[in-house]
Image (spheres, helix red, strand yellow):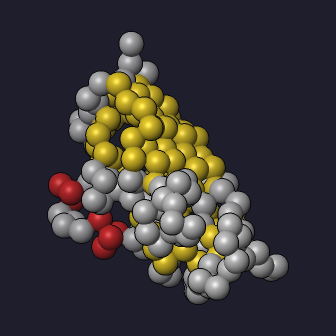
Amino acid sequence: MPDFAVFTELSPDSKPMVPGWNRRVFTDTDARKGNAIQCDFATGIVTLAPGTYHITALSMVAYTTGTEPPETTTIRSPASAGYCRLRVFDPAAGVADPGSLRETPNGDPAILCIGSPSTANLTPSLLETFYETDRTAQILLEHQSGSNPDQIYLRVFVGNSKWHAFARISIRGL
């Protein structure tokens, strides 16, 4: 049976967006079998052993001012638009910090897949792709929401609960 893993970014704290691409940093393992798929919960980097993989992901962001009533979010119209993307991070290319590649253009070969359009009104961006690698590879899930993401958060800690899933990646070896 092939290896598989599902990693989720819950909200143990609030994390505001910055302009450009923001790396998703997963906090929990939902399911996992085998050792071919590893996640670094400090960086969000997912490491894949050589092989072929089916990958799906979702990523969403939310408006928050900090003054919303309990169990609510701010909805705006018009809403800031954005989407997620999946990209390969290659430390052998001489880049020490995966954040330094935040502005990699979508046409770059390191971009594996672009997610569907979404808004900061908790509308997720979804992606699905296949990826084949003949060597150990590292991938990142990223999200952007306009050029000025004022009051837009990658995750929101409210109601004294971390149980708000803002991103999830599911990877299955083939």
Q: Which quadrant of the figure contains the C terminus? A: top left
Residue lying at 47% horizontally and 72% vertically, measured from the top left: 14
Front one among 149 and 157: 157
Front one among 3 and 132: 3
Residue 153 % position (x, y): 55, 74
Residue lying at 50% horizontally and 77% vertically, measured from the top left: 17
Residue 108 % position (x, y): 44, 60
Residue lying at 64% horizontally and 85% vertically, measured from the top left: 67
Residue lying at 49% horizontally and 78% vertically, measured from the top left: 16
User: In this view of the protein, can residue 114 be seen by the observer?
Assistant: no
Q: Residue furthest top?
A: 1
Where residue 122 sits, quadrant-wise, is: bottom right
User: In this view of the protein, can residue 55 be seen by the observer?
Assistant: yes
Where residue 141 sits, quadrant-wise, is: bottom left
34 shown above or below 133: above
Residue 52 % position (x, y): 40, 28
| Horizontal side, residue 102 vs residue 79: left or right | left
Residue 94 % position (x, y): 17, 64
